[in-house]
Every structure is written in C-alpha cells, then in structure tokens.
C-alpha cells in the first residue's frame, strides 16, 4: 500500500489550521455501524384525485454510552424539530414521531427499531444559527435499550483530536450521496481526502462578527455540497490519522458553500457531563 501525501499544520493565535491532501482513499467500512438512520413520515390530506400528502424525513445519529448501562443518542436538533423560524409554532408536514433503525456489526439494519416521540422537540425547538455550536440534541436511553446491542463512538473520543497528520475525513450517513441503491439498508459514505480543517476563526452571522470556537470547518474539494447530503445531518464525523487510528471529531450539522460544519465533540461531552 502506497500513499502520496502533502500535509502541513500551523497554529496562529486562536486559529487552528490543518491541511492535507491524500491520493489513497479507503472504505473505512468498520465505521459504518456507528451511524444510525432516524426517519419519519407525515401523511396529510388527500387531494381531489385521492392522492395523499406524504412528507418523508431522514437524518442520521449516533450513540455515546455512559455509566450504569446508560446510552445517549445524539443527532442534529433540526433532525428532530425540522428547521422552522421562531415565529412558527409547528413546521407543517413534520411527523410526530420517528424511528431509529439499529445496525448489525457490518453496518446493515438488523431490523430492530426504537420508536421516538419527537413532539417536545418539534414544537419547542427552532433552528439554531449555523455557527452557534448548539444544533445538537441528546436523548437518554436506559431501560429501552436493555437486551439491545448498540455501537458507540466512545473508543474514538480522545483529547488529542488533531494528531500530526490526518489523511482522510470519513462521514457515514443516510443522505443519497454515494448510496449505490436506495433499497440498500446501510449508510452511504462521504470520504474526503483533500481538505483544510480550521477552528477558532472569525465568522459573520446576522450582521455580527465573532470568534467561533465551537465548530470545526472542513473546507474541501472532493464532493459537491448539494441536496444529496441532506440526510447526513447528525452524522458522526471521523478523521483517519497517519498513525492508522480513527479520531471522532464531532457531529455534522450543515454546510456553507464547499465547507462542512462540524460541532466539536467537546461541546457534546460538556453537555453530557452536565447531565451526570
């Protein structure tokens, strides 16, 4: 196996900047099982010819396990609430519940499901600003996961999320990007080898400029950022290091032009610690 890499990293003030280009792409299929589909449908009124309104929403999430058999399902909050403006009470056509499909060890559905009532999220949560670092939701499971096997990202969480080199960024999710067949019950892969990861940069939001330390910004040129990746919201984002290890970066929540926005894993861990 040969690799051609050209990478460099610098630390300037509060700006963390890492650039890498690798010609060696891998499947990283062992990470597939950590991405879980969460989906739901809304069936509305019938029209004059009897056709019923049908809105179907798909997102992605993942598990982190805690002490005493506790497990936390984490996804983007807009996956549970839809993206509505503050003056809206309910997003029309958004379902009352969604289903989490559990995976087997190879990342395919094992045909076990968790029913999730999302009313309290749907009717009370609004779309946080893209750069807020707040667009994620944590759902605590205890008894409902007894005798069920879930795969958590715990072993990939480390304080040192930026080793000397990352050669790839890996995102498995349930959008249509790189999904060979809609009937295949597994996540599709976004595999990025030409990228820049930055954090601690100044951004503009609502006419105001501020220093964003909540997110990783992954600027890349490998994929087109379009509607095919919409279902990836809530996906766990991993980086592959030159040391051969995987590192959990955080949660995929959105895009801006060709930049992927990832809420840092430290934000999630901070919220989990507040619960314990």
Image (cartoon, rainbow, N blue to C red):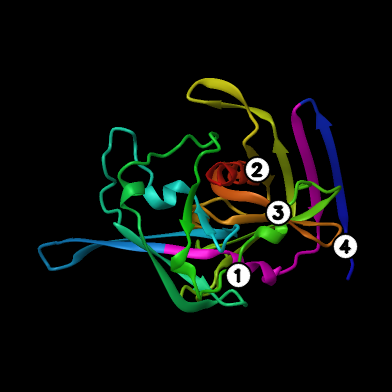
Residue name at image x 75 percent, y 27 percent:
14
Of circles 1 and 4, the one toward us is 1
Location of mark 2 (residue): 266
User: Residue 82 at what x, y percent from top left?
Assistant: 37, 48
Whether 251 is drawn above or below 71: the answer is above
Give the Cα separation between the discs numbered 2 and 1.
22 Å
Q: Residue at x 13, y 62 (%)?
A: 47
The answer to whether 202 appears left or right of 162 in the picture is left
Name the residue located 55 percent from the left edge and 34 percent from the top edge: 131
- Disc 3 or 4, which lies upstream in sequence? 4
The residue that mark 1 highlights is: 33
Mark 3 lies on residue: 157
Task: Mark yes or no: residue 73 visible.
Answer: yes
Q: Measure the C-alpha gap from mark 1 to mark 4.
A: 26 Å
Mark 2 and mark 4 lie on one chain; the one further toward the N terminus is: 4
The residue sitting at the front extreme is 68
Location of the N terminus (image quadrant): bottom right
Q: Is residue 18 left or right of residue 89?
A: right
């Amino acid at each position: 196996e040969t690799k051609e890499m050209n990478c460099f990293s610098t630390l300037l003030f509060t700006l963390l900047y890492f650039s890498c280009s690798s010609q060696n792409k891998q499947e990283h299929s062992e990470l597939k099982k950590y991405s879980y589909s969460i989906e739901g449908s809304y069936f509305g009124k019938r029209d004059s010819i009897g056709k019923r309104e049908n809105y179907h929403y798909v997102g992605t999430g993942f598990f982190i396990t805690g002490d005493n058999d506790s497990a936390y399902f984490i996804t983007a909050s807009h996956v549970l609430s839809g993206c509505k403006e503050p003056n809206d009470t309910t997003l029309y056509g958004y379902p009352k519940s969604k289903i989490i499909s559990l995976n087997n060890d190879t990342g395919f559905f094992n045909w076990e499901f968790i029913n999730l009532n999302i009313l309290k999220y749907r009717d009370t949560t609004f779309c946080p600003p893209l750069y807020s670092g707040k667009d994620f939701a944590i759902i605590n499971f205890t008894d409902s996961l007894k005798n069920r096997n879930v795969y958590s990202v715990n072993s990939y969480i480390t304080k040192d999320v930026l080793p000397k080199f990352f050669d790839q960024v890996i995102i498995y999710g349930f959008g249509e990007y790189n999904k060979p067949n809609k009937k295949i019950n597994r996540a599709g892969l976004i595999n990025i080898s030409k990228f820049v990861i930055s954090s601690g940069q100044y951004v503009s939001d609502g006419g105001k400029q501020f220093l964003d330390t909540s997110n990783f910004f992954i600027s890349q040129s490998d994929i087109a950022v379009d509607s095919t990746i919409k279902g990836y919201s809530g996906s766990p984002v991993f980086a592959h290091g030159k040391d051969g290890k995987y590192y959990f970066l955080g949660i995929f929540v959105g895009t801006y032009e060709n930049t992927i926005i990832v809420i840092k894993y430290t934000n999630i861990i901070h919220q989990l610690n507040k619960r314990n």
